Image (cartoon, helix red, strand yellow):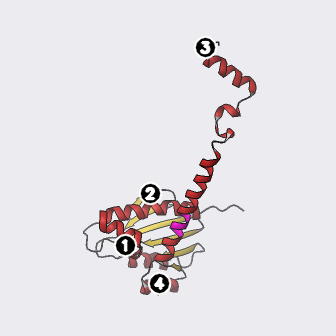
Amino acid sequence: MANVGPVALLFVDGYNIIGACPQLTQVRDQSGLESARHQLAESLVNYAAYKDFEVRLIFDAYAQPNPRAIEPITHHLSIHYTAFGETADTYIECWCARLRHHDQRRIVATSDRAQRLTVIGYGAEWMSAHQLAIDMTTLLQQQRQHHQRQRHRGPSPQRFLANSLSPEAQERLRQMRNGRA
């Protein structure tokens, strides 16, 4: 039977990951928090699609007077902003509690020890910020190596539309290009 939905639901505590990942911390310190959020989301787009995870990237608006919001990025990734007075930890814990009786695999990426213990109590798995960063970096390196191997091979003959045409159709196109048809 074919898989109808994502393999797992991954909750990512955005600011926790930014603070725990050296590359994102460097981006945050040099270019600002918005750039670090953007880079994290970009990395998660590929990671989510490759792993076939539904990823909910959560940023808390604890001290901001904004309402809760969800920004769909791709089929696999959405960014969730918490409401005023609500932390990302609380948001994630509430979702884990709501989904504790569902069969879908749930993973929480954070380095917050208290949150780790809470979500494990609700039946979710835990992934450290460091492990998520390693997984995303490894995936990016694998993709780059794959693209480099493809580039060195040169273009595949099957890649071009003309090569999928019959010899007669190819000859007719050649004549048209040369003004004979």
Q: Residues within 10 Å of mark 3 (few under 14, many from 20)?
A: few
Residue that appears at 60% across and 56% down: 146
Instruction: Pinpoint residue 72: horizontal percent, then vertical percent.
Output: 43, 58
Q: Residues within 10 Å of mark 4 (few under 14, many from 20)?
A: many
In this view, 40 is above or below 110? above
Instruction: Pinpoint residue 41: horizontal percent, then vertical percent.
Output: 43, 62
The reply to whether the magenta stretch includes residue 106 is no
Mark 1 or 2, closer to the camera: 1
Q: Residues within 10 Å of mark 1 (few under 14, many from 20)?
A: many
Q: In front: 101, or 4?
A: 4
Say if residue 25 shows up in the picture.
yes
First in sequence: mark 3 vs mark 2: 2
Distance from Cα at disc 1 to Cα at disc 2: 18 Å
Q: Which mark is residue 171?
A: none
User: Tags 4 and 3 in contact by the CB under 8 Å rule?
Assistant: no
Reading the image, the residue beneath label 4 is 116
Residue that appears at 55% across and 64% down: 139
The reply to whether the magenta stretch includes residue 136 is yes
First in sequence: mark 4 vs mark 3: 4
**Is 144 on the left-hand or right-hand side of 56?**
right
First in sequence: mark 1 vs mark 2: 1
Q: Quadrant of the C terminus?
A: top right
Reading the image, the residue beneath label 3 is 179
Reading the image, the residue beneath label 2 is 73
In this view, 56 is above or below 152? below
Which span of residues is magenta-colored?
135-139
Distance from Cα at disc 4 to Cα at disc 2: 26 Å
Distance from Cα at disc 4 to Cα at disc 3: 71 Å
Instruction: Pinpoint residue 178: horizontal percent, then vertical percent.
Output: 62, 16
Reading the image, the residue beneath label 1 is 15
Q: Quadrant of the N terminus?
A: bottom right
In this view, 6 is above or below 178? below
